Image (cartoon, helix red, strand yellow):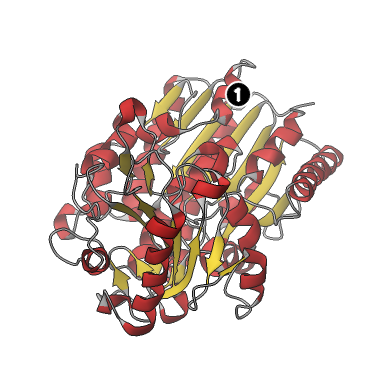
Amino acid sequence: MKPRHILLIDIDGLRPDVLRQALAEGSVPHIAGLFGGRELPRGLFMETAAPAPSITFCSQASLFTGAHPSQHGIPGNQYFDRFAPQQQPRHFAFDVGDTLAVDDAVMVFTHGLASQQLRVPTFYEKMAKQGWEAVVAGNMYAKGAQTWLKPDLSKLTRFIKGKNLFGMSSAEYDQHIVDDVLAYLAENPLPRILTVYFMGVDHDSHKYGPNSQLAALKVVDGLIGQLWAEIQRKAEGSVLVSLFSDHGQIEVLPDDQHSLKLGFPFDREMAVFFDALGLDVHDYPGEDPACDAVLALNGGSAAVYLHNKTGHWWDAPDFERDVLPIGKAFWEAHQTGKYAPDLQNALAAVLIRQVDKDGWYGGYSALTPAGELVDLATWFASQPSGLYLDPVNRLANYASPNTGDILLLSNYAEQYYFGGELTGMHGGLHPADSRATLVYGWVGVNGERWAEGRGRIEQAIAARCAAEGGRLPNVVDMLTGVEALLGN
C-alpha cells in the first residue's frame, strides 16, 4: 500500500528546537494534529543538517532533488557560473544581493531561473514519469510540476522590500500563498503531490532575530489548519505528510561593523580588499565577466572566484599565482586590517582548493594564518567544540565547478557575516544556522501500517548516510524518506 497523496510543508528557516518548544507548549495544535498529538505518536521527528552553505536556494534545491550541491549545481543564493552557455560566465544573485541583480530575483519566479540551473531532475520530474501530478505553491523550484502557483510579484516585493504602509507582514504573505492553494482546490481535485512553501518564519528571523520564530510559527500553524481542513475534504486516500525546513538561524548584530558588504557605490567593505590588491571585483550589475574576481555573499560564508590571469574564466586559475596569495591576504586582513580595515577580526576560516591540480570537483583544504595547507578533518578537529556541524562531510558534498576557489567562513563567534544588516543569519556551518527540521507522518493508515512505514524511512536514511561517509542526516534525505515509503 502506498500513500494516495503527498503533502510537503516547507517552512523556510524553521529551527527544530523551536518546533519542539511549540509542540511542548501546545501552541501549534494543527501541526501536532498531523502527527497524532503534541508528542507526535504518529510522527517521526528528525533533526537534519543543511548543506554547505546553509542558505535557501542551495538547500531548497537539495530538498526537491534529493541531491547534494556538488550534484545539483546551486551552491548558494549567490554564485558564479564560469561555464555559462556561449562562453558568457554569469554571476547569479537570486536574492538580489549587493550587486543589485534585481532581474535575477524576479526571474526566479517569473521564468523559473533557479530551476533552469539545476543539473539533476527534480522530484516532480521523476514522479511525473510515474503519472503523479504535482502542484507547487510559492516555492522557487517547480520544474516538472503540472501547476506552479507563483507568488504575486507585487505582494512578494512588498513583503521582502516594503516598509511601513507599503510593506506586507509575514502573516499576510503566507496567507496569500495559502489562499492561492485554497482557490486552486476549490476548482480542482487534490493533486497527488502538493507542496506549500512558507517564508514568514525565515523573514521574521532575519528581521527580528531567531527568538521571533515561535510567534511566527504559531501563525503558520493556523494557516496549516486552513489548508488541512480542505485537504481532508478532498483526499481520496491516505496522505503522506512531510513538514520540513531548509536551514536554521543564528543571531547576529544588525550594524555596519559586523555586516560585510560589497555594495555599489557605498558600503564596499569587501570591495576595498580587492581594490588594495589591484583586482577588479564584480560589484555592480552586468559587470561580469569583465572582472578579475567575483564574490558571492551567502551570509555565514562567501565564495571567491578568481580569474586565470593568462587565460579565460573557464580555465583553471594557477593556484600558486592566482589563488594562494589572495587566501594569505585574507588572513592578513583578518589579523591586522591590512588591505581592508573592516575585515579585521571578521573571519573564522579561509578554505582553499587547487583546481589546476585536483579538477573542478576538487575539495577544499584549510589555509592556516601561517600559510600552511591542512586537510579539513585535521583543521576542524583543532577548532573549539560547538562551532561547526558535520563540516567535513558537508563540504565534501559542496565542491563543484560552480563553487569558488576560496571559501570564507565569517567569525560567527563575534557575530560577523557577509551581506546586508540583519538580526538573524544563516549560510555558515554553525549548528544554530545549520540544523533543519524534518517530520514525517502518514495520515489515514492504521498504527501497524505507520510503524512499518516509519521503519522503512529510518532504514533508508540510515543506509544512505552510512554509504555517504557516515554523514549526519541531511536535508537531502527528506526525499530519501518519501521515496522509501513509496517503494521507489
Q: In the rendered image, is residue 224 in sight?
A: no
Q: Which residue lies furthest to the bottom in this view?
A: 336
At 35% from the left and 47% from the top, the residue drawn is 308
Specify the amino acid type for callout 1.
Lys
Q: In which quarter of the image is the N terminus?
A: top right
Query: Element type at marker 1?
Result: helix
At 79% from the left and 50% from the top, the residue drawn is 466
Q: In which quarter of the image is residue 266?
A: bottom left
Task: Please tell me whether residue 144 is drawn above or below residue 325 in the rendered image.
Answer: above
The reply, left or right, for residue 149 in relation to residue 32 is left
- On the image, the x and y values in percent for residue 485 come to 75, 34
At 60% from the left and 49% from the top, the residue drawn is 397
- 144 or 334: nearer the eye? 334
- On the image, the x and y values in percent for residue 138 come to 40, 38
Q: In the rendered image, is residue 470 in sight?
A: yes
At 67% from the left and 36% from the top, the residue drawn is 240
Please tell me how crowded label 1 is: few (under 14), some (14-19), or many (20+) other residues with Cα within 10 Å: few
Task: Please tell me whether residue 404 is drawn above or below residue 402 in the rendered image.
Answer: below
The reply, left or right, for residue 278 in relation to residue 40 is left
The reply, left or right, for residue 244 in relation to residue 349 is right
* Residue labelled with disc 1: 126
